[in-house]
Amino acid sequence: MTYNILIVLSALLGYIIVFITLKNSKYNKILNSFLLFIIFISSTIKLIAGIGEVYNDNYLRTLYLKINVYIALFVPSFYLYFKYLIRNQKQFIIKDLLHIIFLLFVIAERELLILDRIVGFKIHYFFSQFVAIYSLVYLLMIFLLLKKNVWNKKATLTFVITQNNLIKKWTIVLFIVIIAFIFRFHIVYYKEYLYLEPSDIHYSLKYLWVVSTVWIVLFIIILSNPEILYGYSIYQMKSSKTIEDSQNNNYWDIKSNTKINNSQDRLLKEKINTKIEHYLFELNAILYKNNYFTNPNFSIKDLAQVLNIPTSHLKYLFKYHSKLSFSDYKKISRIQNSLELINNNYLAKNTLESLSRKVGFSSYNPFFSCFKDVVGKSPHEYISTIKGELDK
């Protein structure tokens, strides 16, 4: 009974996650649609199975076996989730439906036996063999995709490194879950086809509570770290225009909830609390419009002089009201400067190496890495985008 209640609880928690995400999601709706599809279908299947066991209802048990086949759609859905996460795509590509539609046709054939009747061959008997191979192929594709684009992803900005590490841990957890799902399917498959022991309803439900426990852990992770649903785009700037309003990007936090333990900082907070919004506005304006950081030796003390505020105030702002370190602030400002130069046709007579040094980087490599972190594209990709817009 306890296990069955756990299964139902997992299903209900899944519905809550779907509702909260749909209600509050502002970022990557297409990306999260794949994950929400998996959670919704999984929760529905577990709810039917759990209630069927609690009330000993044979109809619900049979219904569970009938719809449980749709779990096969999870692996290609996970693949698309990771693919859209990596590419940071905001629009759905129709041809990606082929990953799911093909498997839907296979499932439909298993249920309707259309081709079986036409060709006179019992194709539906090979459904489990097909799904076994299909799932392993996608597991390999997912592994290669994540290894190349997520688990080895490099960054130069501190907050981007933090974000990358969070997404890396999240994708590792999801990958382990995928392995667990596939492993459970193969156990049933080998039992049925290698040892000729057909599975009954009780065997199919035997370890469902374990799967439910795994889902509950995933739901707790999502609730504790909702930023994992944002993907890689939450911090990337609008590279095509200058933003001067400090509330139009995600770098600043006017009403910071960070706990202040230092007594001097607490006193400083009382002193400058009414000035914080103005300070952040000035910082944001300079972030997008300045040439100060073309000087590699330009320090936080120099910036304080430009803003005409005490250095201690500026350090306090970066410590408690900014998601950027001063080092990251300089790098982002340099990238913004490079975007302005690119848009003003600087590269018509100069190289990217020259551009990187002009805006304050020591060489092209750190410029390249930082550019990709901030803009979301490599310099060459951004230049191609600009050319494409001009050709329209």
Image (cartoon, grey):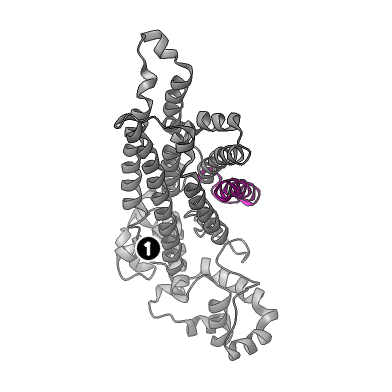
Q: Main secondary structure of the magenta part?
A: helix
Residue 107 location in percent, x, y? 45, 25
Residue 30 location in percent, x, y? 53, 43
Question: Does 380 lie within the magenta span?
Answer: no
Residue 187 location in percent, x, y? 36, 39
Residue 289 visible, this angle: no
Q: Which residues are magenta?
A: 2-31
Which residue is painted at 40% across and 53% down in the image?
377
Amino acid beneath label 1: Ala
Residue 151 location in percent, x, y? 35, 56
Q: Seen in the image, is 300 located left or right of residue 352? A: right
Q: Seen in the image, is 369 located left or right of residue 283? A: left
Which residue is painted at 40% across and 8% down in the image?
118
Q: Nearer the viewer, residue 159 or 392?
A: 159
Which residue is painted at 48% across and 52% down in the image?
214
- The vertical placement of 64 against 325, above or below, is above
Residue 161, picture quadrant: bottom left
Residue 185, picture quadrant: top left
Crowd tier of the residue under label 1, counting other residues whose Cα lies within 10 Å: few below 14, some 14–19, many 20 or above: some
Name the residue carrying label 1.
Answer: 155
Q: Nearer the viewer, residue 354 or 208?
A: 208
